[in-house]
Image (spheres, rainbow, N blue to C red):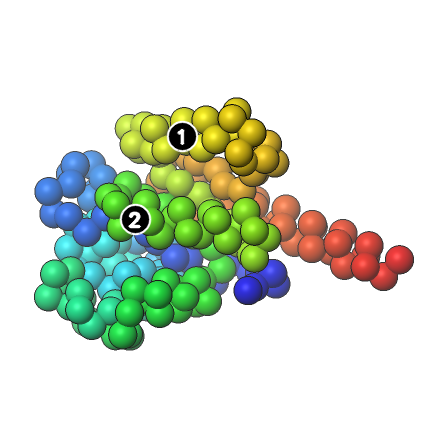
Amino acid sequence: MDFSTSSLSSVCVYCGSSNAADPDFIKAAAGFGKILADEGVRLVYGGGGVGLMGSVARSAHDHGGKVLGIMPQFLRSREILFDTVETVVVTSMHERKMMMFEQSDAFVVLPGGIGTLEEVVELLSWRRLDLHRKPIVFLDQKGFWRPFFELVDHTIESRLTPEAFRAAFRSVAQVEDLLPTLRVMLEETRGLNMMLGAADLT
């Protein structure tokens, strides 16, 4: 896996694909899509045209941003492929997740359901195993992710997850804080990589 993240040119967004989601969540997704476009950062996402997924992609595209959608063939009808943007259709969920990981420098987690939860838990487990050091930031809008954070805390307090894992991700309450927080984490990772590289030479 990748330890060499050095710039923020592509951000992967994990989020829900339900049109029944809270309208404020869908609006926030659109706001983040605009921010990515304005900042010249490519959006990498699951390829769908519905829910928060469709909202972030349409907004990034409508504001002149670059977008890469990645979707498995069997979900084309369920998530309604948004093929106005560059899209790659793959054969499996595993291939989708690996390609999203490889094409991204950092990750943003917006509100989502079981699919979003599964994706981010796998990403965090890779981080726990030290397979990557890419930044991960949750948008904890309206406290959406608080129960998940409490579960992580519970595993730490139960001595099943190390205390150091608290640094594996961060959360913000406002869309505007997502990119700045990713950039701070990226700088911290760059410093850590330099320190580890220097230690290897001694």
Q: Nearer the viewer, residue 115 or 80?
A: 115
Point 65% across, 54% down: residue = 190
x and y percentages locating residue 109 in the rendered image? 36, 46
Q: What amino acid is found at the position of numbered circle 1 in the picture?
A: Leu
Point 10% across, 66% down: residue = 77
x and y percentages locating residue 198 in the rendered image? 81, 57
User: Residue 140, can we see it?
Assistant: yes
User: Residue 173, can we see it?
Assistant: no
**Mark 2 to mark 1: distance in Å?**
16 Å
Q: What amino acid is found at the position of numbered circle 2 in the picture?
A: Thr
x and y percentages locating residue 181 in the rendered image? 50, 42
Point 63% across, 46% down: residue = 188
x and y percentages locating residue 194 in the rendered image? 73, 56
Whether residues under marks 2 and 1 lie with C-beta atoms below 8 angstroms apart, the answer is no
Q: Is residue 38 above or below residue 178?
A: below
Q: Quadrant of the N terminus?
A: bottom right
Task: For label 2, count other residues whose C-alpha is less than 10 Å away and answer few (under 14), some (14-19) or many (20+).
Answer: some
Point 50% across, 41% down: residue = 169
Mark 1, residue position: 151
Q: Quadrant of the C terminus?
A: bottom right
Tell me if 28 is positioned left or right of 154 in this view: left
- Any mark on residue 141, and which? none
Q: Is residue 130 above or below residue 66?
A: above
Q: Secondary structure at mark 1?
A: helix
Q: Nearer the viewer, residue 70 or 153?
A: 153
Q: Nearer the viewer, residue 22 or 91?
A: 91
Tell me if 107 is positioned left or right of 22 in this view: right
Mark 2, residue position: 116
Tell me if 136 is positioned left or right of 70 in this view: right
Q: Is residue 191 above or below residue 1?
A: above
